[in-house]
Amino acid sequence: MRMRKKHWAIPMLTENSYIYMKPKGENGKWQEKFAKTQPIHLEIGAGRGDFLVEKARQTPNINYIAMDREANAFVEAGEKIKEVDLPNIIGILGDADHLLDIFGESEISKIYINFCNPWPKNRHKKRRLTHPIFLEVYKKILKDNGEIEFKTDNDELFEDSIDYFEKEGFDIEVLDRDKDVNEDEAISYYESKWREQGIKIKYLKVRYNKEKE
């Protein structure tokens, strides 16, 4: 079911000092937005923000950027980021198609991709956030030996993504088709939802060594 458009979402996000509405052209400058110079971790498709807000609480020695293109859902993330008032998390309203206009080379240490659209039709698969088209971009914005953590409930997307990562030269460090969750582990809204329904969560952790290029 399509989410009803929230006409107040954009104005609310615009008034939120933790959210950057025009991130293009900020390449290489994101470290300046934080109180301390620390590794930057990026979540693409942050949605309601539960996962990254909890990560920011748990690990203050990491700077976090929550990114989403849909204001309707992301307005909730913006309010959560504003409410926790932490110096190590900000948000970006932006599209993954424009990552190279937003981030500089080797600016990000880790990328999180949680429960992205599986785009099951063949003609749409290039829109997947794990498709080689996007992986080539991630290689540029990730630091050497940068990581990607990927979770999904979708079997086909998971198996295809394993192939994508391997073909693009990423080293698979963890592959789990039925990931357990620790009591204090940060999880997203959708992960909580799928776990309550007994759906297995698939997980990959990969690393890219730029010396291979």
Image (spheres, grey):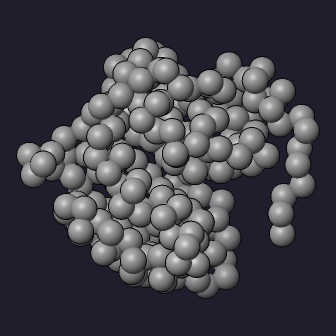
- Give percent across and percent down for residue 25: 49, 21
Q: Give coordinates of residue 156: x percent, y percent.
A: 48, 82
Q: Nearer the viewer, residue 87 or 110?
A: 110
What percent of the width, then of the height, locates residue 179? 42, 75
Seen at 38% across and 33% down, the residue is 40
User: In the image, is 193 to the left or to the right of 106?
Assistant: right
Q: Position of residue 137 (x, y in %)?
A: 36, 46
Q: Residue at point 79% right, 46% down? A: 72
Residue lying at 39% horizontally and 56% vertically, measured from the top left: 133
The image quadrant of residue 38 is top left
Vertical position of residue 165 compared to residue 19: above or below = below
Is residue 179 visible to us here? no
Q: How many marks?
A: 0
Q: Is residue 66 above or below residue 124?
A: above
* In this view, 122 is above or below 168: below
Q: Residue at x 91, y 38 (%)?
A: 7
Q: Residue furthest left?
A: 211
